[in-house]
Amino acid sequence: MAFVTMGPMLKRAQAARYGIAAFNMIDYNSVRSIIEGAAELDAPIIVQVSVKTIKHWGYKAIATWVRMLADDVDVPVALHLDHCSDADVIRRCIDAGWSSVMFDGSSLPFAENKACSEEIYRMTEQAGVGLEAEIGAIGGVEDDKFVAEDAAILANYDECLAFVKDMPNLAVFAPAIGTAHGFYKGQPKIAYDLLERITQSISVPIALHGGTGLSQEQFDRCIAGGCAKVNISTMHKHRFIEGFIGVRAEKPKLEEPLPFIVGQYDAMKKDVVDMIRIFGSAGKAAHAAGA
Ligand code: 13P
């Protein structure tokens, strides 16, 4: 069951209205917390990676960690590249063994975004790898990308339909629906009606970006509206840091590094487990895998 492409499992998740968690990994310990947290709840999982993180660790190390840990569990695990506008990085991820990639052309004019996304689509179809593509402008900071609050733009409904028309096998589609990356300063204005209209009109599962800070009710409504992939990054990064600081505060004289790593692992895994429960994917491993 272990290592899979995410498209088929997202379709099954959308049909049954649960969300599959996609956590942005940080290091090997973080990958362990994500995959083992999912395995503990018998849930499908997506390990996703930002370009900056790949540049730090290298393609081979990340692919090896994820595939090796996926081999040891009985839940479907996908390895996904998060927001990327560089075709060369996408190519290298595919060659290194990623099972899906995201092309983010959302800062381009619509026609150009569509044309570039379709070009990457042809590459991923040939390689047997899933593709995520985005339109509109999701606010906040993700990796090296910053979209100011007043520059965030909801996806246009007609453009959504035109965008996916020539990519029938798109694994997941990310229209901006009012969520944002990073911590929310106020209440996000989520365009549930737009989400529902898009879901009713196209057969591609939807990705929910900006998961950190949303409430159970907001997740429930987005998942009920068709979001099958639910992204969490900022919260995971914070647990990584807090896990370390927590051990330091408790045992200021400790010189042995392993308890710090265990503290980080426990903090990150607790969140993974909590989020999977919220998204309704606990116990859904076999369903998501189509077994
Ligand atoms: P958060 O950082 O808000 O959790 O968003 C993650 C995300 O959408 C990654 O693409």
Image (cartoon, grey):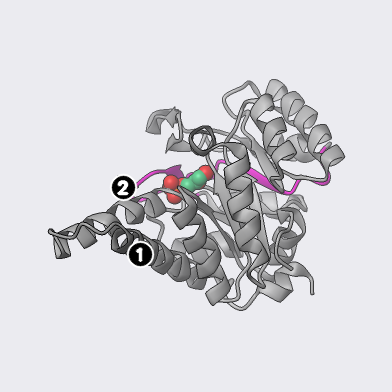
- Type of residue at label 1? Val
157 and 271: which one is in front?
271
Q: Which residue is mark 1?
A: 262
**x and y percent of residue 106 in the render?**
60, 29
Rendered residue at 63%/37% (across/down): 134
Image quadrant where one finds the N terminus: bottom right
Q: Is residue 177 left or right of residue 162?
A: left
Q: Which residue is mark 2?
A: 186
Q: Is mark 2 within 8 Å of ligand 1?
A: no
**x and y percent of residue 255 in the render?**
21, 57
Rendered residue at 31%/47% (across/down): 186
Q: Is residue 252 left or right of residue 88?
A: left
Q: CA distance from mark 1 to mark 2?
A: 34 Å
- In magenta, the rendered stretch is 167-190
Rendered residue at 34%/47% (across/down): 183
Rendered residue at 50%/69% (across/down): 37
Say if residue 251 shows up in the picture: yes
Would you say residue 248 sits in the magenta stretch? no
